Image (cartoon, helix red, strand yellow):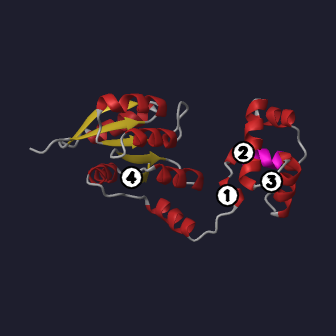
Amino acid sequence: MADKIKVMIVDDHDMVRKGLKAYLATEDTIELVGEASSGHQAVRRFEDLHPDVILMDLIMEEGNGIEATQQILAKDPEKKIIILTSFYDDEQVFPAIEAGAMSYLLKTASSEEIIQAIYKAHAGKPVIDGKVAQKLITGLHKTPQPVDQLTTREREVLKLIAEGRSNAEIAKLLFIGIKTVKTHVSSILSKLGVADRTQAAVYAYQNHLFSK
């Protein structure tokens, strides 16, 4: 009998992990070797658990799935990681694929689709959800713009900069620390290739980034 495919589940929702465990229990050739409730925990545990395939959620409070994927593959480039998430926006899809994830499925996938994705990942064959594949294809035909590099939070900060808000005001409005605001501002200036806040504001208005 062939060796079982060892799988680790990474998700911060207990009910999701229980559901996935129930799916996997129906397969004689798949063995659940462990689970993790955060990206940080996954990075710590995978070396002890030695999974062949990892089912990885993306949005988790303690270490997101993209960071965990990068760190795990940096230690073991042969590890097969399947992103299993509810999100398929550009800010999740492209970084996850760039991080080295083998496959990308949505949590709306059926148990059979998830199980087949595990078998295919183990064999080195990627599986990409149709909606995600469409985004990837569309992305190939888009000319990258500096603003495309901004995260959702950086866009929020840029909008407030364009409104003439100070760092203190931005921190208060977004419920974040001033140091965090300064970090975002520095990143925005770097990504847009501008020298200061005024130029960033001008860029935002010239490119019609925000409706009045």
The amino acid at mark 3 is Val
Q: Residue at image x 81%, y 62%?
A: 208
Instruction: Give the distance between the C-alpha atoms of the residues marked 4 and 1, in whole angstroms.
Output: 24 Å
In this figure, which residue is indicated by the disc labeled 2?
187
- Looking at the rendered structure, the kind of residue marked 1 is Asp
Question: Regarding mark 2 in the picture, which secondary structure is present there?
Answer: helix
Q: Quadrant location of residue 186?
A: top right
Q: Which portion, as a residue range, is magenta?
A: 154-160
In contact (CB < 8 Å): disc 2 and disc 3: no
Q: Is mark 4 on a helix, strand or loop?
A: loop
Mark closest to the chain's N terminus, 4 or 1: 4
Q: Distance between the residues labelled 2 and 3?
A: 11 Å
Specify whether 63 is left or right of 113.
right
User: Mark 1 vs mark 3: which is more N-terminal?
Assistant: 1
Query: 10 Å neighbourhood of mark 4: few (<14), some, or many (≥20)?
Result: many
Q: Mark 1 highlights which residue?
A: 148
Mark 2 or mark 1: which comes first in sequence?
1
The amino acid beneath tag 2 is: Ser
* The C terminus: image quadrant: bottom right
- In space, the residues marked 4 and 2 are separated at their CA atoms by 29 Å
Q: Which one is in front, 113 or 39? A: 39
Query: Which residue is label 4 attached to?
Result: 102
Pair 4/3: label in front: 3
